[in-house]
Amino acid sequence: SVLKIFFRRAMERPFRRLPRCHNSLTTALLVDTYQITMAYAYWRNGTHNRIASFDLFFRKNPFNGEFTVFAGLEECLRFVSNFHFTDADINYLRNEPFACAMDSAFFDHLAKLDCSQLRILSQLEGNIVFPRVPLIRVEGPLLVAQLLETPLLALVNYASLVATNAARHRIMAGECATLLEFGLRRAQGTDGGVSASRYAFLGGFDGTSNLEAGRQFGIPCKGTHAHSYVQSFMDFRDIIDPRLQKSDGSWCSNFVALVKEQLQILVEIKEQLPEGIRLLDTNKGELAAFTSYAIAFPSSFLALVDTYDVLRSGLPNFLAVSLALRQCGYQPLGIRIDSGDLSYLSIQARQIMRAVEEALGDVRAGGFSNLGITASNDIHEEVLYSLNRHGHSITAFGIGTHLVTCLRQPALGCVYKLVDIDGSPRIKLSEDAEKITIPGKKEAYRLYLKNGEPVVDVMIQVGEAKPEIAQRILCLHPFISSKRAYVSASHVERLHHLVWDGLNGGIPFNLDLSLSTARARCMSTIKTMRPDHLRYSNPTPYKVSVSEQLYDFIHKLWLEEAPIGEIV
C-alpha cells in the first residue's frame, strides 16, 4: 500500500533535502558585506571552525499587539539545503574592492562550504510565538553559521510580519467571513507580492487574486472583473452573441431579452422594495456589461456594482441579470462594492436582496437573501474594527495594500545573536534592557492550564530538567526580579524541534513543512489563546519567562562581563 511504501522510505531515508528557494535571488551571496569580512577574519585567525550557537528571535510583537505568527521556515530550510558558493559567486567576490587584499586560499575555502556540519532547531511554522523566545537556533562551525545571518533574517522577517498581519485581520473579521488577498499590484516588487499571497494564506486568508502564487503554493485563486470591464460597454449593442447555455444543456437564444424582462419585473414590484433603490434609469452600459459577464460565467456570477452608483444602478442591474440567470437554472454569487460607505451600502443591499426574494418567492429569487457581499475599498484592520462596531452585511473582504505592505509596521525586527561559542555561553549587554540577550543554548516549553489555555513560555538551559505536568515551576522574568510566579501545568509543549541535521543528511523525513499544515497550526493555536491576548485594543501581554537556574546564570554572567565603573 501507499502507506507502507511511505514508512519504508522513511526508515531507509530518515533525512532529506529540499529543492531550491522559490525566489532564485536567494543565493549564498544574499548576505551583507560584513558577513564576508567577518568570515575572512575568522578564517585568517584560525577560529572559523569553532562551534557556535546563534539565536534568531524578535524583541517586540508587531502592530501594537501581543502575539506573532512564525513563518518562513520552509524557505529557510530550502536555502540551507542548497547553500554553496558557485564559481561565479567566488569570481565576483574576488574582484570586489573590499576583498582585494584577502588571501586567495580563503576563496578556495568558501567554494567548499555547505551546511553539512550544522544543526538547526526551530519552532514550527505557523506557531504563535512571542518576544525573546528563539524562533530558530543554529549550531555549527562559526564561519558558516555567521554567513546564514542575513538570509535567514530576510526569509523570516517579512514572512512572519505578513502572516501576523493576516491573522490579525482574520481575528477581526471573524471565522465566517471570507478573506481574499488582493495586494499583488501594491506589493514591494513581484517577490513581495508572491510572498505576501503565500503568508497571508498561512495567516488565515482563504484565497488570493495572484495566479502565480496559486500555481506555486496551491492557494485558491479568486477574482471577477474591474471597473474597466463595465466602462467598456455602452449598451446592449456591444454584446455580440446574446445566447446562454442553460444549466440543463438547452439554450436561451436571447439572454439579453430575458434580462430586460427581469428588469421590468423589478420596476413593477418597486413599491415593495426599500426606499433608495432606483430601477427606471439604470446605466445601460453597466447592465450590458453584467449581462455579458453572466453569459461568460453563468455559474459564478459576481458583479462589481459601484462603477456608477451602487443603489441606483449597480444593484438593480445585478438583480435583473441574476433573476435572468435563475430562469436559466443558475444561482448568482453576489456583488462586490469597492467604494463608499461600506456599512450603509452593504446593509441597504442586503435589505433590498431580501425584499426581492420575499416579493418574487423562492422559485424566481430563492437564495437572494443570502447572496454574498464582498467589500474591497482600502480595507485594513481598523476598518474591520469600525465595521464591527457600526454593523454591516459584508460576507467577504478583498484586502490589498495594508495587508501586503504592512503599512502599520513595515518590519518585524528579528535579530540573529551569538549565544554560545565552544560551549561557553555569551551575552550581549546594553543600557537598554530590552536589547540584552539571554545567553547559552536554550530549550523552550509552553505551559498550559487545565482549561487548555497557554499561560507562559519558559526557557531553560540545555541539560536542565524539563518541566513536567503538575510540577510546581518557578517562572521568572529574565531581567525584572519582582515579576515571577509558580506555575503548575496540566500540559507541557516542547517548542523547539530538530529541523536540520547536516551530518545525517538534512531535514527529518517526518517533518511536515506544507503550507496547509502551517496554516492549520496557526488557526488552531490562535484558538487556544486567551481572547485578551488577541484583542485589538490594549491586549494583555503574554508571559515569557526563564527558569530559576537560567535566571541565576544570566545575572551571574551579566556581572562577570559588565565593566566595573570607577568614581574619582
Image (spheres, rainbow, N blue to C red):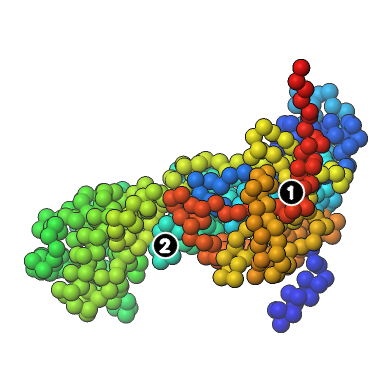
Residue 282: x %, y % from top left: 15, 55
Residue 552: x %, y % from top left: 77, 48
Which of the two residues, 290 or 161, is positioned nearer the viewer here?
161
Left or right: residue 169 versus residue 283 is right
Residue 6: x %, y % from top left: 73, 74
Residue 481 can be seen in this image: yes
Q: For the residues marked 1 and 2, what is the alpha-carbon distance in whole angstroms? A: 40 Å
Which of the two residues, 305 or 454, is positioned nearer the viewer here?
454
Q: Identify the amino acid type marked 2.
A: Gly
Left or right: residue 49 versus residue 199 is right
Q: Residues within 10 Å of mark 2 (few under 14, many from 20)?
A: few
SS at mark 1 in the image: helix
Can you identify the residue that label 1 sits on? Answer: 551
Of the numbered discs 1 and 2, the one sitting upstream in the chain is 2
Q: Residues within 10 Å of mark 1 (few under 14, many from 20)?
A: many
SS at mark 2 in the image: loop
Left or right: residue 40 versus residue 148 is right
Quarter where residue 402 is shown:
top left
Q: Identify the amino acid type marked 1.
A: Tyr
Can you identify the residue that label 2 sits on? Answer: 174
Which of pointers 1 and 2 indicates the residue nearer the eye? 1
Quarter where residue 294 is shown:
bottom left
